[in-house]
């Protein structure tokens, strides 16, 4: 009964602290995200997806999160994909046979309701059963009725043809001339194909600050002329937007959300595993050393001193790079190195003072085995002191993983989608200078939340379990 | 007999999470020149707090501190902190702490700690102060080379002697002895007690000897004060006290002291020591007092004078 | 100081000698471990053999006496000379013996030549490359640790005197900020001050091109040090102050502190001699662990700020897979750590007499 009362009063004590509540909420959120991640996509699929290029073909590069559009007046476009193979978008196909010629025409139209311009436009053409030469014409019609001939592509074989409309300089030159003749002067900024194809053609287009896109129905026309009866064609037009998903995309078109979501179980399992295993290993070794003393104790003491001088991070880097280890194998080495570090001395001194306690002597007197004394008496006594440290050290391991990622270590053969990896990609790509802040902010928020949650929890547990200074 | 130190309505309360601890609750007594006033009482009755109150060693959670302390007719309780520190502390009143106390700074050499009170305000040069320390050590019987050792190198008894020497370095007229021998073995205890007696005689010191050991107090005491629940319930000359204590509590205390090889039943005082946070109403001792009457439960007895030298707080006498 | 006496001096000397010996042994073992780990896959052997063949081929090319031979013959001679070298250096011996040879090399700082990286003076000797980077690292590191030490010490002292005040509570509640490492704060400091406000540089140690004038050069370096120092400071300060303040509070509750008050000693003296002095040993122990951590954390901080120290060197070596440099940097860090441990042992010895008599 007394135990229950004591326990209950402790629980009340705990509930009293608001910070504890906050940290528990955050941790529960993180755990739910982890469960969602694991259930919706298994680990190896996540890794494969993160490392693939084809999977992200239809995503824009360096896009901002979609919800940014709530806060801006000039809406940023989402990606528009017109794909004749999957019947994405409004596409009409017509086929015409004239003598030996086969004319395949795709007429695709889409609604563009944004004031901002797309980031990139790429056209992919898929040609089948072609051996003799053919030609493909590509046209673009704006809602205003202006028609622009984009290009003519000569085809002489089957396969796919890639046309980077965004890189077509001749298109830009032709367009600028057109604008000059129509409006009398040329814009004061460098014209790009995205602007050219979507701009509202009036005075406003002359200055970068006033240029805006023309809203309305756009028509995209591909007309191909082949000389084979069986020739066939498909196309995919990617009009890449500037916003995508909940967290935006990185420079390899990957949806950052994948790394944010899957990074959560990665971070949590990495941090918790490291923390738990190291704590228990240290406790056990320290207890054994304190209890048995003698040569074992001295040996472990020396070992700890040596470990202090082993440069932890360079050593880790060395091992990871030379043996091409991935982050999970590296974790084992981290655990091994950390176990014999300074913390061990602290546990040992705790156990040493515990060793002289009367109930330990009593246990010895009734003939308890060494193992029993250590496991049932000494270690359980230390646990309240140890739990806050355990919890508080989780963030340092999460940051360690991020740090290793930023140093380019622990990638192994296939890089896992962790928060640290995203940070590393961002920093390496110069996101700091180029202002791709979203790339840095979201993984950072996750790191900071995790850190705050576990640190607060550790602090509060410490206050509750180990009251030292009597608060006046 | 000149009154050297007179405390008048001295209060010291502490604020704690559980409430206000009334450790020193309206204490008044006089210490005469050249005599020993023993303050006896159970653990937790406020004896050590009395020492703190006299020396103004107030903790952070002090709730109330008031009263007068007349030292040679000057109310030192009214002095500014810095004046009090420079003039009174150690130079007029010094303290020898409990023997179990960790009273010496572990990282300083003994000589540095002993001469500190002399050199710190620049009045005495280090050389002169060291000479004083050497002489004092010789006088007290501590090997002079210990001056250059660290406290952890000395035994408990030696450390206590060092504390005594340290207390005398500035030639105070009053020394408060707070359980000075309670953590020492009997032989060492006897040695220290002899030393204290000798010092008192040869240097004309006045002692306030705080202890829970009644038998020990009888060795040095000229006057005895009994503390209970933060109050002084009886003050009387030693001879009279040990012959015939007046206050019921004192009576019970004395009869609880075992006499060597005498076959008698040891009497104890029923009940538990009172809480200093919520002391019993009326006379604090009434729950455990065999003579308690209705009045004792309601009204607190004031200080009653019996004759010229005894004061008592008990309705039996008033 | 107590060890000015002859007895004190000899005791101090003995303590120092033992500690130096112990640390030296630990260092040797640590470096040896580094070597074993590095060479488990035979990497060190490969590096060594590459070096030897480089040197041999160089010799053959430059020596006119070999001009008369055909390419084929020269190759055969080269191979033979390489084998002779290998035997001379004892590299054909078993693994254990080889490892000791490498150990001796590492301890004498004979760290070989890099694969790709070159020093500013054009040398490929790993030792030269590393030493070039040593002073920037030490400059940044030492200043940050000194600032941190004194700031946390005096702030901790101040807070312990004002225990329970609003400031005290505020700083204590900010302590969780230290769970976030300095390099992380660095990223955001760069974003704020370099990218958005544009008042401080993105990184590096000095403006490019560096000023000729000595004073301007120093100022430029200072300007570049502001952000990294701030980052490290923000991360370490709050927990440092909290720890120190807690220590000081615990130490101010000691009996001998009350005795000091009873002795009429002035409060400042009591703080210095009775609270600070005895509290130094555990504070120094904490300092040691913190120092070791910051040597390591400094690698990442340097990477973020492209500070031209050993950290960025390590990063460059990682990116170009330059094994000799990686091993060299690891070895030098081991030396640095050993020096740190020993330095703190000396300070410990000065501050706590109990250690000498231990």
Image (tube, coloured by chain):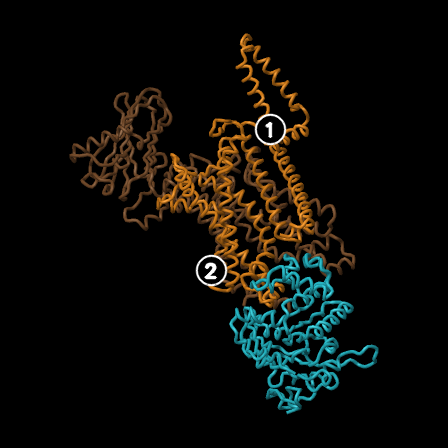
- Identify the residue position indicated by label 1 in the image: C44
- Identify the residue position indicated by label 2 in the image: C170
List x then y, in percent, for residue A132: 33, 19
How many other residues sit within 10 Å of disc 2, few (<14), some (14-19) or many (≥20)?
A: few
Given contact means CB atoms under 8 Å apart, are the residues at marks 2 and 1 in contact? Answer: no
Chain identifier, colour orange:
C
Image mark 2: chain: C
- The image shows residue C104, relative to residue B122, as above or below, that is above
Residue at mark 2 to residue at mark 1: CA–CA distance: 53 Å
List x then y, in percent, for residue C94: 68, 26
Q: Secondary structure at mark 1?
A: helix
Task: Determine the residue positioned at 59% across, 29% down.
Answer: C110
List x then y, in percent, for residue C297: 52, 43
Image mark 1: chain: C
In the figure, what tint was chain B given? cyan
Q: Observer-nearest residue: B96 or C338?
A: B96
User: In the image, is A77 to the left or to the right of B35?
Assistant: left
Farthest residue, direction bottom:
B318
- The image shows residue A242, relative to residue B223, as above or below, that is above
């Amino acid at each position: 009964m007394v135990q229950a009362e004591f326990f209950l009063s402790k629980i009340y004590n705990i509930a009293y602290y608001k910070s504890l509540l906050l940290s528990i909420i955050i941790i529960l959120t993180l755990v739910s995200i982890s469960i969602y991640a694991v259930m919706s996509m298994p680990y190896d699929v996540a890794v494969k997806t993160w490392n693939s290029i084809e999977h992200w073909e239809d995503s824009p590069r360096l896009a901002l999160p979609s919800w940014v559009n709530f806060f801006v007046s000039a809406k940023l476009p989402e990606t528009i994909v017109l794909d004749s193979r999957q019947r994405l978008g409004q596409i009409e196909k017509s086929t015409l046979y004239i003598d030996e010629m086969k004319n395949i025409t795709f007429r695709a139209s889409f609604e563009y309701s944004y004031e901002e311009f797309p980031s990139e436009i790429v056209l992919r053409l898929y040609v089948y059963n072609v051996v003799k030469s053919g030609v493909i014409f590509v046209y673009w019609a704006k809602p205003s009725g202006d028609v622009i001939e984009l290009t003519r592509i000569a085809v002489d074989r089957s396969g796919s043809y890639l046309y980077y409309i965004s890189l077509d300089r001749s298109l830009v030159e032709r367009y600028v001339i057109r604008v000059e003749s129509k409006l009398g002067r040329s814009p004061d900024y460098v014209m790009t194909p995205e602007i050219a194809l979507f701009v509202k053609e009036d005075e406003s287009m002359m200055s970068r600050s006033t240029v805006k896109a023309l809203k309305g129905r756009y028509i995209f026309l591909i007309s191909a002329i082949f000389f084979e009866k069986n020739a066939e064609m498909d196309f995919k037009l990617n009009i890449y937007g500037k916003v995508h998903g909940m967290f935006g995309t990185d420079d390899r078109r990957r949806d950052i959300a994948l790394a944010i979501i899957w990074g959560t179980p990665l971070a949590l399992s990495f941090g918790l595993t490291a923390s738990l295993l190291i704590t228990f290993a240290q406790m056990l070794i320290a207890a054994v050393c304190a209890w048995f003393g003698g040569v074992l104790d001295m040996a472990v003491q020396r070992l700890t001193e040596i470990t202090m001088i082993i440069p932890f991070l360079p050593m880790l880097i060395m091992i990871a790079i030379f043996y091409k280890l991935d982050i999970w194998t590296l974790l084992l080495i981290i655990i091994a190195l950390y176990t014999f570090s300074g913390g061990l001395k602290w546990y040992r001194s705790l156990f040493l003072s515990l060793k002289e306690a009367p109930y330990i002597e009593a246990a010895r007197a009734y003939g308890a085995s060494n193992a029993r004394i250590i496991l049932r008496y000494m270690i359980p006594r230390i646990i309240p002191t140890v739990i806050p440290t355990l919890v508080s050290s989780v963030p340092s391991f999460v940051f360690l993983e991020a740090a290793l990622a930023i140093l380019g270590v622990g990638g192994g053969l296939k890089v896992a989608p962790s928060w640290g990896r995203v940070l590393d990609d961002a920093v390496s790509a110069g996101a700091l200078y180029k202002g791709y802040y979203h790339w840095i902010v979201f993984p950072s928020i996750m790191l900071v939340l995790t850190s705050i949650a576990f640190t607060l929890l550790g602090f509060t547990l410490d206050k509750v379990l180990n009251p030292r200074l009597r608060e006046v | 007999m000149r009154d050297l130190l007179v405390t008048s309505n001295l209060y010291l309360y502490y604020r704690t999470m559980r409430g206000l601890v009334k450790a020193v609750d309206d204490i008044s007594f006089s210490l005469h020149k050249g005599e020993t006033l023993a303050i006896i009482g159970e653990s937790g009755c406020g004896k050590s707090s009395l020492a703190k109150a006299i020396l103004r060693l107030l903790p952070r959670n002090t709730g109330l501190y008031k009263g007068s302390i007349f030292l040679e007719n000057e109310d030192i309780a009214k002095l500014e902190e810095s004046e009090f520190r420079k003039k009174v502390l150690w130079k007029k009143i010094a303290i020898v702490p409990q023997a179990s106390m960790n009273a010496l700074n572990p990282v300083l050499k003994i000589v540095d700690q002993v001469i500190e009170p002399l050199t710190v305000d620049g009045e005495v040069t280090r050389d002169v102060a060291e000479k004083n320390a050497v002489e004092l050590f010789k006088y007290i019987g501590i090997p002079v080379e210990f001056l250059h050792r660290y406290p952890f190198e000395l035994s408990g008894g030696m450390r206590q002697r060092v504390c005594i020497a340290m207390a005398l370095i500035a030639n105070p007229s009053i020394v408060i002895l707070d359980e000075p021998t309670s953590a020492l073995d009997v032989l060492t205890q006897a040695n220290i007690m002899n030393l204290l007696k000798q010092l008192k005689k040869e240097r004309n010191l006045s002692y306030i000897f705080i202890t829970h050991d009644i038998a020990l107090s009888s060795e040095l005491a000229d006057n005895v004060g009994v503390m209970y629940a933060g109050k002084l319930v009886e003050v009387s000359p030693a001879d009279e006290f040990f012959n015939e204590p007046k206050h019921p509590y004192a009576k019970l205390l004395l009869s609880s002291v075992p006499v060597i090889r005498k076959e008698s039943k040891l009497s104890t005082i029923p009940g538990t020591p009172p809480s200093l946070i919520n002391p019993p109403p009326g006379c604090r001792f009434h729950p455990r007092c065999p003579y308690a009457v209705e009045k004792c439960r309601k009204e607190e007895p004031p200080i009653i004078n019996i004759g010229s030298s005894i004061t008592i707080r008990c309705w039996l006498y008033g | 100081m107590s060890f000015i006496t002859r007895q004190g001096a000899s005791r101090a000397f003995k303590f120092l000698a033992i500690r130096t010996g112990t640390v030296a042994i630990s260092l040797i073992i640590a470096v040896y471990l580094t070597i074993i780990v590095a060479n488990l896959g035979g990497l060190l052997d490969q590096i060594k053999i590459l070096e030897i063949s480089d040197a041999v081929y160089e010799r053959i090319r430059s020596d006119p006496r070999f001009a008369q031979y055909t390419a084929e013959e020269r190759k055969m001679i080269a191979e033979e000379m390489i084998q002779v070298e290998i035997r001379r250096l004892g590299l054909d011996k078993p693994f254990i013996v080889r490892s000791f040879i490498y150990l001796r090399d590492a301890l004498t700082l004979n760290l070989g030549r890099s694969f790709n990286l070159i020093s500013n003076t054009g040398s490929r000797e790993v030792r030269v490359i590393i030493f070039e980077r040593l002073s920037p690292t030490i400059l940044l590191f030492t200043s940050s640790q000194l600032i941190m030490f004194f700031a946390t010490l005096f702030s901790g002292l101040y807070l312990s005197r004002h225990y329970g005040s609003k400031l005290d509570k505020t700083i204590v509640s900010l302590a969780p900020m230290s769970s976030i490492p300095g390099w992380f704060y660095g990223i955001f400091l760069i974003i704020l001050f370099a990218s958005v406000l544009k008042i401080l540089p993105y990184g590096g140690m000095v403006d490019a091109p560096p000023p000729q004038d000595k004073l301007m050069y120093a100022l430029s370096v200072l300007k570049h040090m502001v952000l990294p120092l701030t980052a490290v400071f923000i991360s370490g300060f709050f927990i440092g102050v909290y720890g120190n303040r807690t220590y000081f509070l615990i130490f101010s509750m000691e009996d001998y502190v009350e005795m000091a008050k009873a002795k009429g000693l002035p409060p400042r003296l009591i703080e210095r001699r009775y609270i600070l002095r005895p509290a130094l040993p555990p504070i120094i122990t904490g300092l040691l662990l913190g120092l070791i951590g910051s040597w390591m954390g400094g690698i990442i901080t340097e990477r973020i700020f492209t500070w031209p120290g050993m950290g960025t060197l390590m990063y460059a070596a990682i990116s170009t897979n330059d094994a000799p440099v990686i091993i060299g940097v690891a070895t030098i860090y081991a030396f640095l750590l050993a020096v740190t441990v020993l330095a703190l042992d000396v300070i410990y010895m000065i501050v706590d007499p109990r250690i000498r008599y231990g």
